[in-house]
Image (cartoon, rainbow, N blue to C red):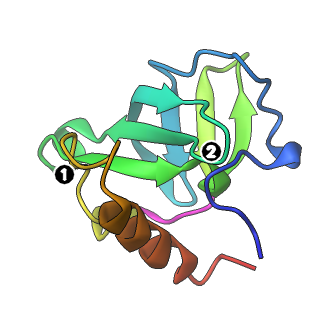
Amino acid sequence: MVNLWIYRETSGRLAGTDLTGCKVEALDGSIGKVDKHSDEAAASYLVVDTGPWIFGKHVLLPAGTVSLVDMDEHRVHVDLTKEQIRSAPEFDKEKHLGDPEYHSTLSGYYRGMSHRA
């Protein structure tokens, strides 16, 4: 089973690279920019500010959803559609660090995506 919380080796992401401010591209277009990211072992993620696209919603994307990091273009590509991201549980800054139930909810949502192998 794929670990959603680590970057894929094929993503081109180099450990320690700051992704803050990079544009985020879904399968069907731009969705916002990286507001925050974490490189914690087995708990890596991006927090994406969707801006006016979904009225300022922030979403947490597990690192395993990242398909490509292009630092030349300052873009992070994810293998999710805009609708999958729009429907994702909203980022909860109070729960994301210490609430195992929140982490489990996110894992369940992203594991259920049709793009997952």
Q: Quote the CA–CA distance across marks 1 and 2.
A: 18 Å
Report whether residue 88 is seen. Answer: yes
* Residue at 47% over, 19% down: 20
Q: In this view, does 67 lie to the left or right of 94?
A: right
Amino acid at pointer 2 = His
- SS state under label 2: strand
Q: In this view, does 59 lie to the left or right of 104?
A: left
Q: Does the magenta stretch include residue 40?
A: no
Q: Whole-percent x and y of residue 12?
A: 83, 34
Q: Mark 1 points at which residue?
A: 54
Q: Give the range drawn in magenta.
A: 79-84
| The N terminus, quarter of image | bottom right
Report whether residue 83 is seen. Answer: no
Q: Does the magenta stretch include residue 83?
A: yes
Mark 2 burial class by Cα count in 10 Å: few <14, some 14-19, many 20+? many
Q: Name the residue under label 2.
A: 77
Q: Is residue 74 left or right of residue 3?
A: left
- SS state under label 1: helix
Q: In this view, does 97 lie to the left or right of 5?
A: left
In the depicted view, which residue is nearer to us: 60 or 78?
A: 60
* Residue at 76% over, 23% down: 15
Mark 1 burial class by Cα count in 10 Å: few <14, some 14-19, many 20+? few
* Residue at 67% over, 76% down: 116
In the depicted view, which residue is nearer to us: 74 or 88?
A: 88
In the depicted view, which residue is nearer to us: 23 or 4?
A: 4
Picture layout, residue 52 above or below residue 104: above
Picture layout, residue 37 above or below residue 20: below
